[in-house]
Amino acid sequence: MMIGLLTSPFGMALFVLARIPNVSLRGIVRAVLPLIAPLLLADLVLVFFPEIVLVLPRLLL
């Protein structure tokens, strides 16, 4: 969900972050871009290895 808040076309968190300290949207996007890579990597790991996510639900059944 955080990836959707930080990327286009919506990027609501970007607009909020740009308005609080009066920084340009371009500056905020440049600052946030390095943080998106680990989020995408974590998503890929969870997609290709769903056992990681399913351990707890399987324990509860």
Image (spheres, helix red, strand yellow):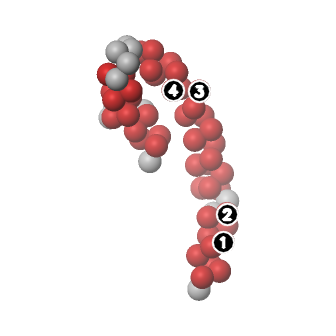
Location of residue 26 in the rendering, given as x and y in whole percent from the top left corner: 41, 15
Q: Quadrant of residue 39?
A: top right
Task: Name the amino acid, label 2.
Answer: Ile
Q: Amino acid at mark 3?
A: Pro
Q: What secondary structure is marked by label 2?
A: helix
Residue 11 appears in the rendering:
no
Query: Label 3: which residue?
Result: 34
- CB-based contact (under 8 Å), mark 1 and mark 2: yes
Q: Residue at x 51, y 26 (%)?
A: 32
Query: Nearer the viewer's eye, disc 4 or disc 2?
Result: 4
Answer with left or right where residue 50 lies relative to residue 17.
right
Residue position for label 4: 32
The amino acid beneath tag 1 is: Val
Q: Position of residue 31 (x, y in %)?
A: 52, 21
- Sort mark 3 into few (<14), some (14-19) or many (20+) by Cα contacts within 10 Å: few
Between 20 and 52, the one lying in front of the other is: 20
